[in-house]
Amino acid sequence: MGKLNEAWVNAAFQEADLSNSKLDKFHNKIYGAASPRLLALINNLCAADNVNYLDLGSYRGATLLAATMGNPTATAVGVENYSYEQTEIRPNEPDGPGGIWEGMKNELSYHINRHNKETPDINPEATTLVEGDFAEVDYSKFPKFNLCFMDIFPNSPDTYDTFFEKVLPHLSHESVVIFAGVSDQDKMEIINKALLRHQDKFTEQYEVIRITHSMANHKHYYNGIRLMGLKKKLISTVKKAVTPKKVATPKKEA
Ligand SMILES: C[S@@+](CC[C@H](N)C(=O)[O-])C[C@H]1O[C@@H](n2cnc3c(N)ncnc32)[C@H](O)[C@@H]1O
């Protein structure tokens, strides 16, 4: 095994490009916004030492459960609010009680149970599901994450601002972030602009992009991915800690 670094990422891609990984039929067949190559990539990245993986937008569990399969030192946290069901005619109008898609919740729970009970040598404690809006999650409850798949959909510039403001502080000093959906040029542009708005927070160490010819491409990386090796800048954290709060000056009496 080895560290999750640029060399590991390149090796993980080499195998994932051939859909090679430790995933079995059950994991590869979970219905989702994912493809065998994308799942293989996550599985291969999580084979590095002590990966703590954050899966933002877990849907029915395909990308979440790919993390720990055959990877004894990996842990994974999935976040899902059951708000968007891509198989429905009106995907963002959940019809279940509590304003959620009940069917998605049941499927995700079934898949997690099956993964925990039927996967050989799996640690059932290794995967955690957080149900709710990713903007509201208390990420400080978990050890820092060194790999994150940002797959919240639908999304907007605000979604990425939330990512950089609320999630990035809980990634380790050096981490790998994968953005989904970049085969859509408009999405790539939104991500580029978000990266510029938040460039005071990190430096980019390396990057791998896999664009697909079409969206939902099961033979390639589904909607396209952009993987970035990030190093957080300490400066913005330090600045926040040392900048004195402004105190109102009392007005002089006449
Ligand atoms: C593209 S799908 C994720 C696909 C998934 N990674 C897979 O393996 O198939 C996007 C998911 O993000 C969820 N979502 C959308 N907005 C969210 C939010 N604010 N917080 C948490 N989940 C959200 C949707 O309900 C949907 O399941």
Image (cartoon, rainbow, N blue to C red):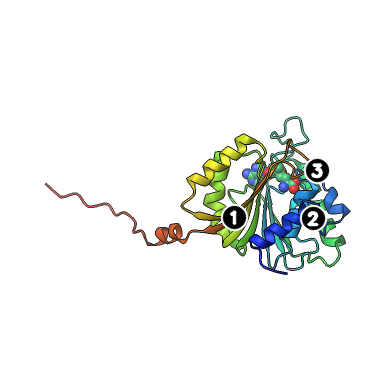
The image position of residue 150, as x and y in percent, is 64, 48
Residues tagged 2 and 3 counted as in contact (Cβ below 8 A)? no
Q: Amino acid at mark 2?
A: Ile
Mark whose residue sits in front, 2 or 3: 3
Foreground residue among 180 and 152: 180
User: Which quadrant of the figure has residue 99?
Assistant: top right
| Element assignment for label 2 | helix
Q: Quadrant of ligand 1?
A: top right
- Secondary structure at badge 3 equals loop
Q: Residue at x 76, y 30 (%)?
A: 89
Q: Amino acid at mark 1?
A: Tyr
Name the disc covering residue 219, or none: 3
Which quarter of the rendering shows the N terminus?
Answer: bottom right
Q: Amino acid at mark 3?
A: Lys
Crowding around mark 2 (Cα neighbors within 10 Å: few <14, some 14 to 19, many 20+) is many
Between the C-alphas of marks 3 and 1, the distance is 25 Å
Q: SS at mark 1?
A: strand
Q: Position of residue 214 (x, y in %)?
A: 74, 35
Cα gap from disc 2 to disc 1, whole angstroms: 33 Å
Q: Which residue is mark 2?
A: 112
